[in-house]
């Protein structure tokens, strides 16, 4: 890496820094999905501060843990976390969505160190991660696979196809983390296509399932630390978390923050975190 | 063709443990030996082509050569976006294998007819589309696919296809294999429909026209050198068991146009006028325009021009 950085060791510190980056980059790029990124950033921060065995140092290692962000529209969160942890230079973030930039509006893997899979069409990350987990399981290779999904994404049939396959093959190296912010593209999940009883669905499909606050770093880390079969963590989150006027609102699935919004958001982040 | 493919794959997989065979719950009586002999390299995913294809891509990303086997449109159109994003975009070495090309599953109905797959698969970036003519080509192409690391679509017939080549072909990447030589024109075909081309060439010979017959198994990598010589010689008819729209004939026309070659080209492909027509493979080929009579008519019309 061109600019050596000291990786964050505490998820809270990483998430706070990443929230600033997410708000800046979505504003500069006039990009959508700021609230989706704020919703998932705590989960990613926990994964990239030790819950997953992955860092800038071992990112090409054969036995590294694999993290796949299947909700590719929250790319700003993943890019921020990876840049802050030294996977690639932080100044790439300022070029987010620019012509000829490395970082696109949906998660792009080519030329971006640390990104395992290009995503953006929902329902692709879990089957892909399942394939890696199955290959590793069959060959006795080490390393777990973490797939971070959105709750709206669970409308996709591949979710439940994959859930059946993972259970049938006893994949105790596969973890799904659902960012359960309860909002999808047009409105609330329960008004669009009911997911509840959501945990019961995963349990019925044979997954070890826990519902945990998706903004509680220590609970998330504990939930991610052990598994005895395919594991699903339903991370109870707030869309737009950390910026009150973005929280729990469909509008901020799309609206890019203005300069004024950025200032207000930064004031809040400074106070709240 | 399918039996030759599975047999060839099994022998290779015994030596190369990185070869994996996945099926979406199809291949009864066909894949049993592979499963019995190499259970660690065989996965029946269940009836779930979309998850299976994404899974195959992830599996392949760990350094494995994954063959995904199913029939008709199930491993192609049913999971097209998984092939597009997870296989082609990520450039993972997955081989999509479909059995029952064209009207191979004739009387099973249109849901089981693969007539648009070449057009759609060859439009995908990084994808090599391969259509063997007979068991001899299938065996050689299977081995060359294993050796390559590219995303590949292998379009196979069903079973019992006759040998089209009278002498063993020497299959080489991107090369058209001549079945028999001819002086006044060429019938180029892709797949087991070559039997119709051979029959048409015999009829034309009876009319005093010496026509070459050639198999074109590589649809994404076009043999321009062969095409150039063929067009200089006389009319070229491209014969396929697929829709006219975007198929092998269309691929040839695109390549000829891009290379600015001159010459007469005619296409023989499926009319698809009656999607619900029931019948066996030969019947459906014939009623959809893929028959000796049409080939001769088209060839003679091009000669007259």
Image: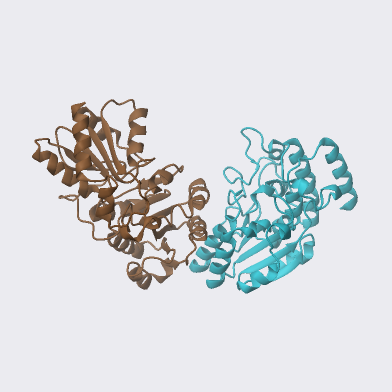
- Chain identifier of the cyan chain: A
Residue B149 visible? The answer is no
| B12, B239: nearer the viewer | B239
Horizontal arrangement in the rendering, residue B43 relative to residue B155 (left or right): right
| A271, B180: nearer the viewer | B180
Residue A131 x %, y %: 52, 61
Residue at the image point whose x is 78% and y is 61% from the top: A217
**Which quadrant: the N terminus of chain B?**
bottom left
Horizontal arrangement in the rendering, residue A49 relative to residue A136 (left or right): right
Residue B25 visible? The answer is yes
| B47, A234: nearer the viewer | B47
* Farthest-out residue, right: A271
Residue A238, image quadrant? bottom right
Residue at the image point whose x is 51% and y is 59% from the top: B55
Q: Up-down: is A120 above or below A54?
A: above
Residue B19 x %, y %: 40, 60
Horizontal arrangement in the rendering, residue A213 relative to residue B265 (left or right): right
Residue at the image point whose x is 73% and y is 62% from the top: A235
Residue B225 x %, y %: 27, 33
Q: Up-down: is B178 above or below B102?
A: above
- Chain identifier of the brown chain: B
Horizontal arrangement in the rendering, residue B222 relative to residue A241 (left or right): left
Residue B104 x %, y %: 31, 56
């Amino acid at each position: 890496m061109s600019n050596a950085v000291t990786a964050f060791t505490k998820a809270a510190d990483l998430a706070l820094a990443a929230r600033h980056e997410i708000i800046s980059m979505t504003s500069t790029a006039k990009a959508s999905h700021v609230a989706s990124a704020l919703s998932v950033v705590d989960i990613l921060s926990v994964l990239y501060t030790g819950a997953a065995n992955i860092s800038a140092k071992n990112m090409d290692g054969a036995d590294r843990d694999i993290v796949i962000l299947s909700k590719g529209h929250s790319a700003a969160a993943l890019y921020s976390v990876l840049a802050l942890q030294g996977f690639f230079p932080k100044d790439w973030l300022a070029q987010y969505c620019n012509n000829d930039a490395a970082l696109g509006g949906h998660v792009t893997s080519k030329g971006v160190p640390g990104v395992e899979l290009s995503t953006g069409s929902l329902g692709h990350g879990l089957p892909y991660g399942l394939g890696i987990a199955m290959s590793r399981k069959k060959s006795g290779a080490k390393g777990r696979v973490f797939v971070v999904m959105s709750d709206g994404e669970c409308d996709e049939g591949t979710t439940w196809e994959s859930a059946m396959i993972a259970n049938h093959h006893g994949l105790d190296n596969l973890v799904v983390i659902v960012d359960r912010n309860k909002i999808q593209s047009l409105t609330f999940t329960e008004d669009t296509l009911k997911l509840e009883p959501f945990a019961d669905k995963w349990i019925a499909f044979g997954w070890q399932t826990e519902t945990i606050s998706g903004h509680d770093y220590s609970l998330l880390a504990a939930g991610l630390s052990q598994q005895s079969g395919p594991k699903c963590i339903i991370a109870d989150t707030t869309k737009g978390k950390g910026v009150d006027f973005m929280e729990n609102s469909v509008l901020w699935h799309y609206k890019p923050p203005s300069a004024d919004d950025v200032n207000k958001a930064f004031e809040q982040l400074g106070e709240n975190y | 063709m399918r039996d030759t493919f599975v047999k060839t794959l099994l022998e290779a997989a015994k030596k190369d443990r990185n070869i994996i065979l996945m099926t979406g719950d199809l291949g009864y009586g066909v894949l049993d030996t592979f499963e019995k002999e190499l259970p660690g390299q065989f996965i029946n995913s269940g009836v779930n082509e979309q998850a299976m294809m994404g899974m195959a891509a992830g599996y392949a990303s760990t350094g494995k050569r994954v063959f995904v086997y199913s029939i008709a449109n199930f491993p192609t159109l049913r999971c097209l976006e998984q092939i597009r994003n997870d296989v082609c975009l990520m450039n993972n070495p997955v081989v999509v294998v479909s059995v029952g090309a064209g009207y191979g599953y004739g009387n099973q109905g249109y849901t089981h007819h693969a007539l648009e797959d070449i057009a759609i698969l060859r439009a995908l970036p990084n994808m090599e589309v391969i259509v063997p003519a007979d068991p001899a080509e299938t065996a050689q192409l299977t081995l060359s696919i294993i050796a390559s690391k590219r995303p590949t679509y292998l379009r196979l017939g069903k079973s019992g296809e006759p040998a089209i080549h009278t002498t063993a072909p020497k299959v080489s990447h991107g090369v058209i294999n001549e079945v028999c030589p001819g002086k006044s024109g060429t019938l180029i075909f892709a797949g087991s429909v070559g039997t119709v081309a051979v029959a048409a060439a015999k009829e034309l010979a009876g009319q005093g026209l010496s026509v070459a017959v050639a198999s074109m198994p590589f649809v994404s990598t076009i043999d321009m050198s062969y095409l150039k010589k063929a067009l200089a010689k006389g009319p070229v008819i491209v014969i396929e068991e697929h829709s006219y729209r975007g198929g092998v004939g269309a691929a040839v026309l695109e390549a000829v146009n891009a290379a600015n070659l001159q010459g007469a080209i005619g296409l023989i492909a499926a009319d698809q006028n009656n999607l619900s027509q029931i019948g066996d493979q030969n019947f459906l080929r014939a009623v959809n325009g893929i028959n000796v009579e049409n080939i001769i008519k088209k060839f003679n019309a091009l000669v007259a021009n």
